[in-house]
Each structure stands twice: as C-alpha cells, then as structure tokens.
Image (cartoon, rainbow, N blue to C red):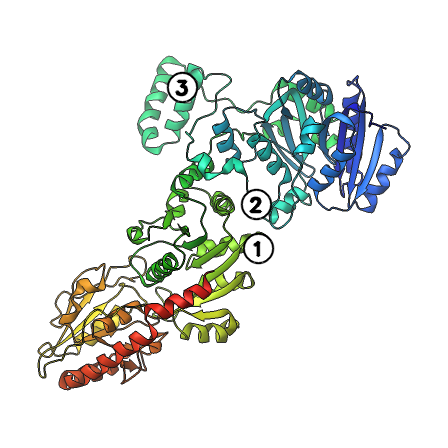
Amino acid sequence: MPKKFTKLSIILTTHNEGLMTHHTMLSVFRSLENFTDTYEIIIAIDDGDEATQNYFTRYKDRADIKILTCNFNDAGLSRNFAIKESSGRFVVILDGDDLISGNYFTNTVETLEQAKCEIVVHPNYCLSFKDVDNEYVLQVLGESVEPETDAIMQFSRHRWISAIAATRETLVKFPYIATKDGFGHEDYALNTTLTNAGILHKVAKDTIYFYRKKPTSRLQQNNNDRVAQPYSALYDYKKWQKFRLIEPRKTVPKGRKQKLQEQYIRIRNNKFLNFFITPLAELAKKLTHKKLIDDPKEFQVPAVVLEEWKKIAKIENLIFPTQDTLAHTTEYCADLVGDLGKAYHKLCLQIKSRPDYIFIVPWIVPGGAEKVLLNYLKALQELHPNWRIAVITTLSATNTWKDRLPSNTFLVEFGQIAHNLSIDDRDILLTQTLIQLQCSKIHIINSTDALLWMARHRTLVENNFHITASLFCYGLVTDTNGEGIWDIADPFITRVYPLIDKFYTDNTAVIDYLVHKEGYDREKFVVHYQPTPINESVKHHKKNSILRILWAGRISLQKNPKLLVRIANKLDPEKVQIDAYGRMDEQERDGFEFPEDSAVLHYRGPFQNFQDLQPDKYDLFLHTSIIDGMPNVVLEAASFGLITLAGNTGGVSDFVKDNRTGFLVDDAKNEDEYIVIINHLQQNPEAIYPMAQSAQTHLKNQYAWKPFLKSVQEAFQ
C-alpha cells in the first residue's frame, strides 16, 4: 500500500540527554498547540543511554509519536534514518535537549508552503544558553544573498544551526554526511551542500530556537576533535577565481546618526586621533551642555525574542531574562564576508590546477633545505612531466627564490596571506585548502606549522593523507653559548611520528642521532644524497704563496662565525687571507658583528649563488658550524675544486673523509685544531691537489644526478 503522508514530520534526535529531553518535549507540545494540520513526532534514539531510553517509554502508546532506536553513534546518520522513516511532506529537524518557540511549527510550515522554489528554512533567531553559566548569545540567522557572497560567508563560518526544515524530498536527496575519518559538523556540511545546489536558505519569521550548550555534546566533541568540513564543490578553486568580493546587502541602510556613531567609536579607539579629538568634544559638551555624538547604545534583545524568552522560561526555569541576564547577552553575527573567506579567495587565485603532489615548507629563500626542495622539484619534473606540484609556504616572508621553481610547479603563499588571521582561522584555512586541493600526497620540509596541523588533526591525516617529511639536523638556541638544542624532531615530529610514512634526509648522522635520542625506527629513514654537478677542473696550488680561504654561510649561531674570528686572530696575514660571505640572520646571529680591523678576515657581504664567489680564487673552504646536516656549501666547494676543513659534526663526515677528501677537526669549537691544519696546508700546498681530486671523485660517485633521480623515483610515486 502507498505510504500515507502527513503535513509535518518532527524529528527529534537523542543520545544521552535523559530527563533534559522532557523540557524539549514540553516545548514541542506547546508549539503544536498552534499547529492545526497533521503531524507526526519521530524520536530517533541513537546509541541512547538507559536514562534516555527509559524516559521515552512513556510515549510508546501515543499514535502521533514513533520511537526509533539505532546504533550509528552519529547525529547525521541517525537523522538520515529517521527521515527515511518519516511520512511528512515537510520535515523539521530538532535536537533532543533544545527548545523552540510557540510559533515554530506554524511559521516554518507557512514559509515552506509559500516558497516558489526549493528552499530550506531556519529559525529567525537562535538563543544559546548554558545551564550553569549566566552567559547568553543571540544569533540573528540570515538568508541567501548573491551566490558568491553566500559561498564566501559560508566558508568563513557556519551561518546556520543544526535546526533545519525542508521538504522530505529535499532531505532525502541531500542526506547528512557521516562524522568519521576526521570529517564532521554534519549540519554545516549539509547547509554547504544545499547552498552549492542552489537551494535558497530562508528564515521563518519570528521563530526562536533555544540552544543548550553542553560540554558533553556531540558538537563540543567534534570541536575538541577539530573535525573538518569535507570537500565541497561550493569551495572549488576554479569557481572562486571568478569571484568578486561582495559585501552582503543590508536590509536596512545605515542612517547618518549610526554612521557618525561608528566613526566616533573608531576615533575613540584610536590613540592618536583620540588624543586630539576628545579634548575638543569635552570642550563642546561643557559649552553647550550637549554631546556632539551620543554614545552607541548597548545591544538590545528584540521584543519578539524577549517575549518568547519569558514564556519558554516557564519550561526552562533557570533561563528567565532578568536584567542581569540581559546585561550578559551578546549578539553573534555569522553573515559576514570575513577575513577567513577573503583569505581563501586570495589563495584560490594562486592555485593553478589540482596538484599531484604537495610540498609544505616555511619559505623559499637561499638555504640548504630550500635547495633540497628545488632538487626534488626538478627531479619530479623530469620523472613525471605531466604532474602538477603545489608548494605551500607557511611563514610570512618574501620568497626570494620562488623564481627558481620549475614550470610545472605553482606557489601558494599561505604564510603571507594568512598572517593576520587568528590561530584558529589559520588552522581552518590550511585544513580546508588541503582538503579542497584533493591531493593526498604531502611532503613536509621544516614547516612547524604543517607539523602542528598534523597534531591537531590526527584522525583526518591518518585517514586521508600520506605524509612524508625531510629531516636534516637539530639547531641551537640563542643565548645558550651553543649548549641549548632546538630540534624539529622533538617535539614537533615526535608528536606525529606514527602519522609519517617515511623520513628523507641528506646525511646518515641525523639518522643515528634520532634513533639514539628519540627512539625512531631506522627503517623509516631513506638517505637522498643531494646532487651537485662538477663545475671546474682542479687547479694546482703554488708553494709559498698566500693560502686563500673561503668561508660562506648564513651568519647565525649554528654556523659559529665567532670561531671564525678567533681562528683569524691567530693567523699570519702575510701567509693566510680569509674572505667571508653570507647574509646576517637577524633572529639567530646573537648580536654577532664581523670585526672591521682584522688583517686576515674580510666580510664581503651576502651572496645568492656559490659560483658568484669566484671560488677558483681560493685554496681551501673553511666550515665552522657547531652542528649541521650535510652542508650544501661543502658539496659546492668540492665541485669547484676546493677541499673543506670542518669540525666533525652532523653529517659533514658523510662527504669529508679526514685526510682523503678534506680535513676534520674532532673538537669543532677549538680554534687551535683548525689553525694547525691551516698552517700545515700553507706550508705544504702540494697536499691539496690530490685531496681535491679525491673529493671530486667522491662527489661524482655519491652525489650525482642519476642516483638521486633513481632514489626520488622510488620515494615519490
């Protein structure tokens, strides 16, 4: 037999509300007193506790109430279940511990019946309250405006609430999503889907939804778990690239007085302007006994809300709107073209296509880690010419090397675009951008922002992304005399270690360090020796001439330029000259300045490329870092025929083999050990040539392009 349809199905989803649901039911019955058409009430008890199940047994014999039980443990799926069991032309969705106004059903159904197109209906107002806190928030829910503005506002924040009404046909056609795999806020996702489908959002005039905020609610659990919105065509980057940023239309234009008050607030809150304007305003008030501009009024609860609030308080006693309660009531507006939506719009303008791989890095500036990135990108372009690669930078910095990115790579400057956003909004922006890019393969190089994002979204990452990361070495903390260690592994990598499939590094020392110190599995590491082409043939050194030494690197605590100064102070300027190049690291230089009166050491300024330093002028490359991975400058020096003298720290020994391809100093902080070797080479320059040949041979065998390409092919698939 065909199903007999009623006018309205009222679906109430419950879980562990217990007797709180009684107040909800009383408000439902109260609202039905004004509803004159046919209806049914469907109670969906999803994985309900004993108290909740026991409560609803009192309604088991009522013909107008249908009680369903399920074990989805998911609000969206339990709603879908109840919708399929409903027989109403229209469906209203309510939560089991909230309350509604007396006109709720009448006005909602009237709005649906008068619609000339497919719509969904929301309450006009939502008053949020807590049982144990005199804190109330009133939201005036908005309606659909221009499609572009709707999308931008919806990205910025959820404009509506879980209470919704529509035809049964609409809700069957657009079901709720399951809250799983790190995705959630099923009502937010549903409203986004409806918006994308072109279904208009309307409010039922003067209806009020009283929302109970509970620390144990599923919504709060979703917030605690930092669930994300799933992919939505509403946020497709191609669509957003055509958007204009449109401010929503105002239903009531601002009057002259309101504009003056807003200007007054801006002046009052600006210290500079306030200094000049306030004395004039006070003088005018004194002379005329009148204010030039009235102070803006406090937020006033609309009369229709206040009247219904008093009535619903007869059911929920603790929320009566006393004067103190009203003083603690604030207004929340979700209908804003907020900074978050604007930031996403800017990001979309930088997206060239759906990527096949994503790299997340702090920035693209001169540095060793950045050269590793460029090597990976070059290799992937050769191996997969049809791939599109996205590079996301997470720091607000000028990416001075971005012009070096291959043609198949596009840059998304997240750090620059999002730097003014709050921490939570930055997190939402990064999360939704990665979801909308629809690329599961991500490689992280030194981005703490990306690692913190992983820690916040463990379930999302585990079920939707394949993460690899690069690790090179630890760093040093300023003002600790080289003793304090700053390590990206501890705590950043360690927090998310199980979520990372593989670690790639450029040296073996970091593997030994992390296996010993952090307990990492050696099997999770792969060494990618970075390719360095041979640039020049090795030249002979003339005996008894001045030994010319090159030092190049970032001027920072880690590179230990203070040791370089101490070495220079003990050398004979008639026998040794040192040129130093590098950019000053303002955050990590620890107050260091090169001496201007040294006869041996000469600071020549920053550099972009090693070859610009004319390395063929020098005989020896000096490396004084306290700690390092595999320094790229050491490899570049060898490519130009320079042997390296360095402290035996970090991954340097992977390339510099003592007395074979260079010289290693056991005590990396002892200048005297460096000086002994420098003086020896000045007196015995013939030792340099065969060692430089050995260094270049080692470079060709282990740091060539073909073996690197093969290792990348195996890693990035």
Question: SS for tag 3?
Answer: helix
Give the image quarter of residue 285. Answer: top left
Q: Residue at x 32, y 82 (%)?
A: 666
Q: CA distance from mark 3 to mark 1?
A: 49 Å
Indicate the position of residue 210 as horizontal and vertical percent values: 68, 30
Up/down of 171 relative to 297, above or below? below
* Marks 3 and 1, the one that precedes in the sequence: 3
Q: Is residue 507 left or right of residue 624?
A: right
Residue bearing the label numbered 2: 228
Q: Residue at x 11, y 71 (%)?
A: 599
Q: Is residue 646 left or right of residue 108?
A: left
Which amino acid, mark 2?
A: Ala
Residue bearing the label numbered 1: 458
Please state which of residues 523 and 537 is positioned toward the viewer in this rendering. Answer: 537
Q: Is residue 99 left or right of residue 227?
A: right
- Image quarter of the N terminus: top right
Please state which of residues 174 and 265 is positioned toward the viewer in this rendering. Answer: 174
Residue bearing the label numbered 3: 260
Which amino acid, mark 1?
A: Arg
